[in-house]
Image (cartoon, grey):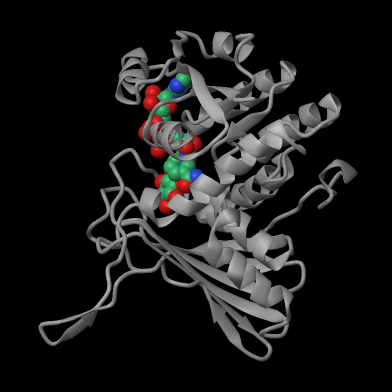
């Protein structure tokens, strides 16, 4: 059976996911599309030659009897309402990060999903599917560096637009680390602090960039994450784990090592779409296969909640300059790992 998917939001990642569902992955077909910008949705149908219905209203797409699963790739503030509507229809939903704008919103989704009695939500935390992060996790789990003690991480984008705000450094950018580092360490956060180094002249007026976020986990691991979204030179994701007996670092994406003109060099990617292209493919194929087969197994609504609780505290810490507590509710049995 081919899974019939409806997509809400045909911006950058919406189109990229439609491309992979249509040209790269197997077992799914995009049969319905919506965007608040109907022109963009129409253009997407034409660009990917989709045999899909254009819905003017996202809720009519979710209710469409032909739509078996929903992909939410619209702006963050719209996610909660669309995910709740999909759950109300009993339809599996893949939602890009953030699952909701606040931890309270994520809890409403988790509550609705639990009330439905089965897993319906997968969150687009694609780094859990990245080969490099998976290899790093294996090293830690196998005791290859002893117990992890510290992490030094960086999340660098070449530039961001004028609409990017200081809080987006947390909710849009750091949110990936908030998810993947918790998964990497199998540990929860207990506190956060944000400190501001000297500001780059390349950030637009009003944006504090870079920022350093300091996290502490329940087991006492200390993490520093540099978020630098106008670094100019590339899209660069770094993660080094310092353990009791060794260190382990996220592998660089593979690239030809060039020896030429008295230099040794290798390319640095500039686009998130390329940097994590395999991970996006794997996460979405897993969603399609999960819906058609044994059920969903990827990042859960609880993962979305855990990242959002930490993000809420980081937002407070951005303003207060203090160490802010991160207090999570107890994980329901429904979200216990398999
Ligand atoms: P974008 O601005 O390119 O696209 C967003 C689209 O949503 C636009 O076409 C907009 O018109 C549409 N939209 C807004 N409100 C809507 C509504 N009420 N109903 C229907 N459509 C609506 O943004 P983007 O970069 O594609 O990001 C979209 C989401 O994906 C964000 O939540 C972002 O954080 C997430 N994202 C995730 C990753 C990742 O690495 N996992 C990467 C990029 C973006
Ligand atoms: C964007 O939304 C992403 O998810 C990218 O992975 C991240 O690097 C970027 O900062 C965000 O704006």
Image x and y of residue 50, in percent: 40, 20
| Residue 320 location (% of width, % of height) | 55, 55
Taking the spot 47% from the left edge, 9% from the top edge, the residue there is: 55
Q: Name the residue located 48 percent from the left edge and 33 percent from the top edge.
A: 21
In-front residue for pair 157/277: 277
Looking at the image, residue 285 sits to the left or right of residue 109; the answer is: left
Task: Name the residue: 39% across, 68% down.
Answer: 254
Check the image and name the residue furthest to the left: 261
Between 113 and 316, which is closer to the camera in this rendering?
Answer: 113
227 sits to left or right of 3 = left
The outermost residue toward the front is: 1
Q: Residue furthest bottom?
A: 245
Which residue appears farthest toward the right when viewing the image? 333
Taking the image as drawn, is residue 279 in sight? yes
Query: Could you say which quadrant of the image residue 262 lies in?
Result: bottom left
Q: Residue at x 58, y 74 (%)?
A: 151
Looking at the image, residue 260 lies above or below residue 335:
below
273 is higher (above) or lower (below) than 94 = below
Tell me if residue 25 comes above or below residue 133 in the rendering.
above
- Quarter of the view holding residue 168: top left
Foreground residue, 306 or 16? 16
Is any atom of residue 221 visible in this view? no
């Amino acid at each position: 059976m081919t899974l019939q998917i409806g997509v809400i939001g045909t911006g950058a990642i919406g189109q990229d996911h439609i491309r992979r569902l249509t040209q790269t992955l197997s077992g799914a077909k995009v049969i319905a599309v919506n965007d608040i910008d109907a022109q963009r949705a129409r253009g997407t149908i034409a660009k990917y030659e989709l045999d899909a219905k254009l819905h003017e209203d996202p809720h009519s797409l979710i209710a469409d009897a032909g739509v078996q699963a929903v992909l939410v790739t619209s702006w963050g503030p719209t996610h909660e309402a669309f995910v709740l509507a999909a759950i109300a229809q009993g339809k599996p939903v893949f939602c890009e990060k953030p699952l909701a704008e606040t931890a309270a919103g994520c809890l409403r989704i988790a509550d609705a999903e639990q009330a439905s009695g089965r897993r319906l939500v997968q969150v687009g935390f694609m780094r859990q599917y990245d080969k490099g992060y998976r290899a790093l996790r294996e090293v830690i789990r196998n005791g290859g560096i002893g117990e992890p003690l510290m992490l030094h991480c960086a999340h660098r984008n070449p530039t961001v637009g004028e609409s990017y705000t200081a809080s987006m450094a947390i909710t849009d950018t750091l949110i990936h680390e908030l998810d993947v580092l918790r998964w990497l360490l199998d540990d929860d956060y207990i506190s956060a602090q944000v400190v501001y180094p000297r500001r780059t002249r390349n950030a637009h007026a009003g944006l504090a960039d870079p920022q350093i976020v300091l996290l502490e986990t329940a087991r006492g691991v200390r993490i520093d994450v540099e978020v630098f979204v106008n670094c100019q030179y590339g899209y660069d994701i770094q993660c080094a784990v310092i353990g009791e007996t060794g260190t382990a670092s996220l592998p660089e994406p593979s690239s030809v090592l060039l020896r030429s003109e008295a230099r040794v060099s290798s390319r640095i990617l500039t686009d998130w779409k390329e940097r994590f292209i395999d991970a996006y493919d794997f996460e979405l194929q897993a969603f399609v296969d999960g819906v058609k087969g044994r059920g969903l197994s990827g990042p859960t609504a609880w993962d979305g909640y855990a990242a959002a609780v930490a993000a809420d505290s980081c937002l407070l810490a951005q303003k207060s300059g203090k160490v802010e507590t991160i207090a999570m509710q107890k994980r329901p049995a429904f979200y216990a790992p398999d």
